[in-house]
Amino acid sequence: MIIREANLDDTSAIAKVHIEAWRTTYQKIMPDEFLANLSYEEREQRWVKILSNQADDAFTYVVEDEIGQIVGFASGGKERNSDRLNSGEVYAIYILKHYQGQGLGSRLISTIAARLYQFGMVSMLVWVLADNPACRFYQRLGGERVEQKQEEIGGVQLIEVAYFWQDIAVLLVV
């Protein structure tokens, strides 16, 4: 498995991972109809826009399996709410269900943290749905739950929680 920076040729594969991971991860959290109606084309267009407009302080990495198929991705950059000085954010991290539990998530988080560190960011946060089983993953990596907010997704009010790392140097050796 290799991790590399994403490029425009990856948009279709990233969109596929994004939707498939949403459908498995959020199966009992979001309405079935909402998940079933997610559009690969719309998601691919969104990723074309994201990857076309990324600045130095925003980036996306993909994980490829042995035959070059993208099985996961993570994106990050400067913290979007600017509430914390010198803080970065993991915007998204998704791995196909079959590849979860193999250490890829930890490697992606470490990769994002390393890139943020290069830009002088010393802390990091990630927003996660409170009912997402991945919350335990962030806790195991040392993320501290610091905030929560309500978001509407798919016509349902959901709670998002933020996990925060005061010093991302601890993530550089994950």
Image: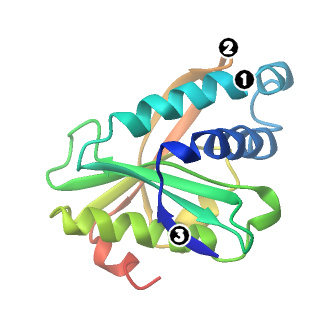
Which image quarter: residue 140?
Answer: bottom right
Q: Which of the two labelled residues, at mark 1 and mark 3, occupies the earlier sequence position?
A: 3
Residue located farthest toward the top when viewing the structure as drawn: 155
Q: Secondary structure at mark 1?
A: loop
Q: Position of residue 109 (x, y in %)?
A: 47, 66
Cα distance in 3D space between marks 2 and 1: 16 Å
Label ID, residue 39: 1
Circles 1 and 3: CB atoms closer than 8 Å: no
Q: Secondary structure at mark 2?
A: loop
Residue located farthest toward the bottom when viewing the structure as drawn: 173
Q: Amino acid at mark 1?
A: Ser
Q: Amino acid at mark 3?
A: Ile
Residue located farthest toward the front when viewing the structure as drawn: 9
Circles 2 and 3: CB atoms closer than 8 Å: no
Q: Which of the two labelled residues, at mark 2 and mark 1, occupies the earlier sequence position?
A: 1
Residue 163 placement, left or right of 56 = right
Cα distance in 3D space between marks 1 and 3: 26 Å
Q: Amino acid at mark 2?
A: Gly
- Confirm whether residue 115 shows in the render: yes
Q: Is residue 103 above or below residue 40?
A: below
Which image quarter: residue 62?
Answer: bottom right
Q: Callout 1 environment at 10 Å: few (<14), some (14 to 19), or many (20+)? A: few
Q: Which residue is mark 3?
A: 3
